Amino acid sequence: MTGLMCTQGRQLNDWSADYRFFSQERFSTEKIFAVVRRTILSALSSDAPLIVAMDDSLLRKSGTHIWGSGFRRDPLSPPFHTNLVRGQRVLQLSAALPGQSPETPARMIPIDFVHAPTAVKPKKNAPPEAWDAYRQLQKQCNISRQGAQRLKALRAAVTADEHHSRRPLWGLADGRFTNRTVLKDLPDRVTFIGRIRADAKLYHPPCPSPLPAKGRKRRYGLEAPTPLELRQDESVPWQTVRVFAAGQVHEIKVKTLSPVLWRAAGYDRPVRLVVIAPLAYRLRKGSRLLYRKPAYLICTDPDADLTAIVQAYVWRWDIEVNFRDEKQLIGLGEAQVRTPAAVQTLSAFAVIAYALLLLAAALTFGPNGLPQDLPTPKWRRRIVRHRASTAQLMNQLRYELWSQTLAPAHFSPFMNKEDADMKSKKFRPVLAAAVCYATV
């Protein structure tokens, strides 16, 4: 808030009304996110699904009286030792805006952001009613349940739009959300793609028996190979799909098995198993060949296109880029606000500013366009960029807002007088370029 007030030249005015802007919930984050969502929907083709990535993150906090903060597992801790840090848990949904061709990356733009705190544990000597209420609230605050609720709300919002009511919705998530809570609570016309364990137990659909069945009806058939066993099975051939990843088009080898049943999804929801072979890479030219880890995916639509499934899940990585840019460049989580309303609205306000920046750049330059007004520094000319970074877009925004103000007044050259000073002139940097590049 202090930065916004100083930018507007209001640092000497009364700031009490500005600080109440977030604590009193004087703007609706859902209505602004709805504008971003409708713009993305209008940019998609008529038969393309709305692809949404879902993930949670941690905003580190130092104050002990900040609402919703608590000790969480540090995701940056080493695998052999779990560390705890104080922070706030948030949940975000980002929609994919594909490029102009299949061989270009997609831009993930945030369309939903909520604060997802855990339930506050009562004291040891609290009455039994407080413990019962805590257990009920603990189930409601589960991150998987909140993720399922956000998918339901998104599906309802898309259905309410008369122009996109029949558009399918694809949800992408990592292994944290690929569980019973999310899969058994999926709304209609939502396809979920997520990662599963290598040793997940899968089953074939039950074969109909010609004889009358005795006892209860069989829900699961014979046991199917696990994802690891399918990858190691030489009798199942590998298929090759072309997807865009890591700056270029790769030919990725995959195996698939469909339909199969997973108890976490239920007997009435057949899924498709997709095994992605490890991708080979080299750290530098001439070094030895290394391999990444294999990936095991499930898709709740067994008839979905295999290339589309793999390409959509590769796009999911861009939500991790969203979190990095929001924290490092936008300043998400830096404000030490304490009230529940300010914690939710101020964090969502930062994400909204980031989403509007990406959306405006996509509409102006294209999803993978590059602004050409500001020349790139000399040390970056050899780097081939497929799209503009967030730092470049912020510099472009500063250039468009400040260039007219910083430009010197232009006079007609009615007099031409040579400088009598024969000494070499001192270097004078261009003010506009200096200001625009100072914050890189």
Image (tube, helix red, strand yellow):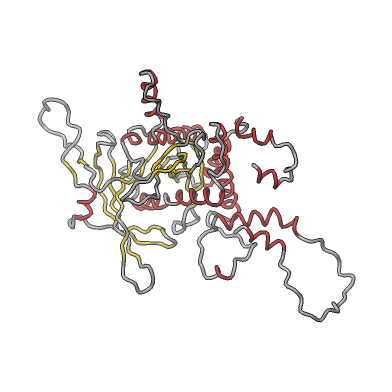
Residue 361 x/y as whole percent:
59, 52
Residue at position x 22%, y 51% in the image? 228
Residue 236 appearing in the image: yes
Residue 165 appearing in the image: no
**Residue farthest to the front?**
125
Give the side of residue 268 with respect to residue 332, left or right. Answer: left
Q: Is residue 384 depicted above or below 390 in this figure?
A: below
Q: Nearer the viewer, residue 209 or 372?
A: 372
Residue 268 x/y as whole percent:
27, 33
Question: Quadrant location of the C terminus?
Answer: bottom right
Q: Is residue 426 depicted above or below 151 in this figure?
A: below
Question: Quadrant location of the N terminus?
Answer: top right
Residue at position x 59%, y 45% in the image? 353
Residue at position x 65%, y 35% in the image? 19
Q: Is residue 70 depicted above or below 8 in this figure?
A: above
Number of marks drawn? 0
Residue 222 x/y as whole percent:
15, 40
Q: Nearer the viewer, residue 11 or 368?
A: 11
Q: Nearer the viewer, residue 324 or 368?
A: 324
Give the side of residue 139 with respect to residue 43, left or right. Answer: left
Give the side of residue 187 with respect to residue 420, left or right. Answer: left
Picture quarter containing residue 26? top right
**Residue farthest to the right?**
414
Residue at position x 49%, y 47% in the image? 45
Residue 332 x/y as whole percent:
54, 45
Picture quarter containing residue 127? top left
**Residue farthest to the bottom?**
422
